Image (tube, grey):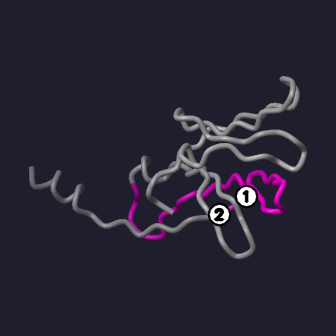
Amino acid sequence: MFFLFLIASREYDFSFYHRNLRSWQLEDSRVLVLHEAQPYCSRNPCPRVLLSPKVYAFIKSGSKQIDFNASSGKIKLADGRTAYVGNDQYLRIVGKDVSTTEVYKLNDNIYR
């Protein structure tokens, strides 16, 4: 029992590698960005669940970043397509036909 307590109470020192996976220009000159944050441990072995990549979307307006999630509604891209995040956490870029539609799985959580 004591051994389980030691594992559960251990502090992990981890940081993130950040990269933009994709970006789209919006009608109003802002940018919608699909971003990935890949955690890595710099000290102590980390549990595998903490090391899964975090993928989330945000709208960049100058130096401001606004989270883009299911409660954000729909936005119009510069190329006429519509972007939204469904309750199932998929970012959908919907065009007039199937060939212009894109779908991305988001797995955002509190670690950023």
- Residue 12: name its quadrant: bottom left
Task: Point out the residue furthest to the top here.
Answer: 98
Check disc 1 and give the amino acid type. Asn
- Give the structural element (helix, strand or loop) at label 1: strand
Percent x, y for residue 90? 61, 36
- Residue 93 figure quarter: top right
Instruction: Give the main secondary structure, helix, strand or loop, of the magenta stretch.
Output: strand
Q: How many angstroms separate mark 1 from mark 2 (CA)? A: 7 Å
Residue 26 among magenta residues = yes
Left or right: 49 as drawn, with respect to 60: left
Q: Residue at x 55, y 43 (%)?
A: 70
Residue type highlighted by circle 2: His
Against 95, residue 48 (above or below) is below
Residue range corresponding to the magenta coloring: 19-46
Observer-nearest of 72 and 20:
72
Circles 1 and 2: CB atoms closer than 8 Å: yes
Q: Which residue is mark 2?
A: 18
Q: How many marks?
A: 2
Q: Nearer the viewer, residue 10 or 89?
A: 89
The one nearer the camera, 83 or 103, is: 83
Q: Residue at label 1?
A: 20
Across and down, in percent, residue 42 comes to 48, 70
The disc placed on residue 50 is none
Picture residue at 53% right of the left edge, 59% below the top? 39
Mark 2 falls on what kind of element? strand
